[in-house]
Amino acid sequence: MNMTVISHLFARVFFFLALGMLSVAIIETLLNFLDYTILSGVYSAGRLIELSAALLIFVIAILLRQIRDGVSTQSGS
């Protein structure tokens, strides 16, 4: 496998993982208003949002690298 294919795959996986964690955090916040919980104190909703943001920063870095590589190959041709 090519390194660009692997980084593209990791970017997609991390994006959907971050999206899933963000949706769980939103659902947890809404359920906390009704005195329910789905995480039972393992992680708070704020901590899930922080972890989601960390994954999204990694995804943004990978996408910026792909854009840079694409621009450099276009200008080099």
Image: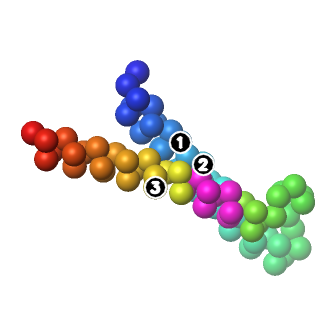
Image colouring: rainbow
How many C-alpha atoms fall within 10 Å of the one at disc 2: few (<14), some, or many (≥20)? some
The residue positioned 89% from the left and 58% from the top of the image is 40
Who comes first in sequence, dot 2 or dot 3?
Answer: 2
What mark, if any, has residue 17 been given in the picture? 2
Between the C-alphas of marks 2 and 3, the distance is 14 Å
Q: Find residue 33 and report its image quarter.
A: bottom right
Q: Find residue 24 and report its image quarter.
A: bottom right
How many C-alpha atoms fall within 10 Å of the one at disc 1: few (<14), some, or many (≥20)? some
What mark, if any, has residue 13 been given in the picture? 1
Q: Mark 2 and 1 residues: CB-CB less than 8 Å, in contact?
A: yes
Q: Residue furthest left?
A: 77
- Give the residue at mark 3: 60
**Residue 58 to residue 1: above or below:** below
Q: Mark 2 and 3 residues: CB-CB less than 8 Å, in contact?
A: no
Q: Where does the image place residue 21, in percent across and percent down from the top left?
A: 66, 56
Who comes first in sequence, dot 1 or dot 3?
Answer: 1
Question: Which amino acid, mark 2?
Answer: Leu
| Residue 36 in sight | yes
Between the C-alphas of marks 2 and 1, the distance is 6 Å
**Residue 75 to residue 50: above or below:** above
Seen from the viewer's position, the closer of residues 28 and 8 is 8
Q: Residue furthest top?
A: 1
